[in-house]
Image (cartoon, rainbow, N blue to C red):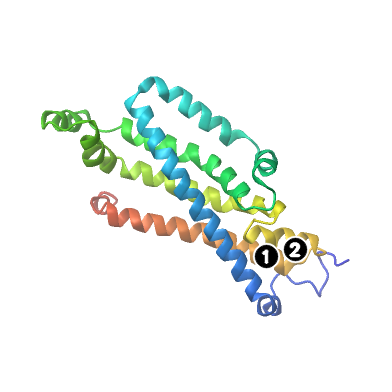
Amino acid sequence: MQYADAPGNPWFSWQYLRDNSDTVVSALVEHVSLTAQAVVLAAAVGLPLAVLAYWFRPLTGPILALSGVLYTIPSLALLAFVAPLVGTTRPASVLIALVLYALLLIVRNALAGLNQLPTEVLDAAQGMGYGRFARLFRVDLPLAVPAILTGLRLATVSTVALVTVGSLIGYGGLGDLILGGFRNNFYKAEILTGTVLCVALGLLLDLLLAGVGRLLMPWTRGARR
C-alpha cells in the first residue's frame, strides 16, 4: 500500500495523464453531459413552476416547500432511493437526483425576479392590452432574466459538484477519477486530476453563463461601472 507521503506517489504526474488521457477525457465528457442535461431539465421544470407560483400566489408556499424539501435530502440518501427505482446501472438515476437538487435554485431565483418587477411597467403592459401570456413572454420574463440567470449559474455550479456523487454507481464523471484514486491505494495523481478538472469546469461554466448574461443584458455593463 502506498502512503500519502510516499515519493513514488506524487500529486501531479505527466505519466499518469499520458497513460490515461482517454479515461480522463471520457470522464470529463460524461461530467459535462450530465451537468448540461440536469440543468436543462431542471430549467424546463423549474421555470414553469415559478410562473405558476407567480400567477397563482397560493401555490407559492407549496412549490417552494416541496423544492426545498428535495434540496435538503442528503445526496447519498436521495441517490440510494432513486437508483433502485430507475436502475443502478443507468445514468438516469444520477440525472433524476441532479434535477431534483437544481429545482430549488432555479424556482426560487426565477420567482424572486418575477415578484420584483416594477409595478408601473406591469400597469403599462396591462394598459397596452397585453394578455397574461403575451405579458409573460414580452415583459415579465425578459425583465426577470437577471434573476433567472443567477439561478441557472448557481444550479450549474452546484450540479458540477454533485455529479461526483454518482461515482458510487459508476456514473460520476470526474468523480470516478477521484473515487478511483482513493480506492487505488490513495493514488494522488488520479485524485488531483479529477479534483482540479471538476473545479475548473465549475468556474468555466459559471464564466460562460456570465458572458451569456452580458450578451443578453447589455444594459447591465454600464450599470456596473
Residue 225 in view here: no
Residue that appears at 21% across and 35% down:
135
CB under 8 Å between discs 2 and 1: yes
Residue that appears at 27% across and 33% down:
117
Percent from the top left, x then y, of residue 9?
79, 71
Percent from the top left, x then y, of residue 134?
21, 37
Above or below — where is 23 with respect to 41?
below
| Element under disc 2 | helix
Q: Residues within 10 Å of mark 2 (few under 14, many from 20)?
A: some
Side (left or right) of 48 relative to 13: left
Looking at the image, the residue that sits furthest to the left is 128
| Element under disc 1 | helix
The residue beneath circle 1 is 192
Disc 2 or 1, which lies upstream in sequence?
Answer: 2
The residue beneath circle 2 is 181
Side (left or right) of 159 relative to 61: right
Q: Amino acid at mark 2?
A: Gly
- Indicate the quadrant where residue 58 lies: top left
Q: Which mark is residue 146?
A: none
Residue that appears at 58% across and 61% down:
30
Residue 88 in view here: yes
Q: Residues within 10 Å of mark 1 (few under 14, many from 20)?
A: some
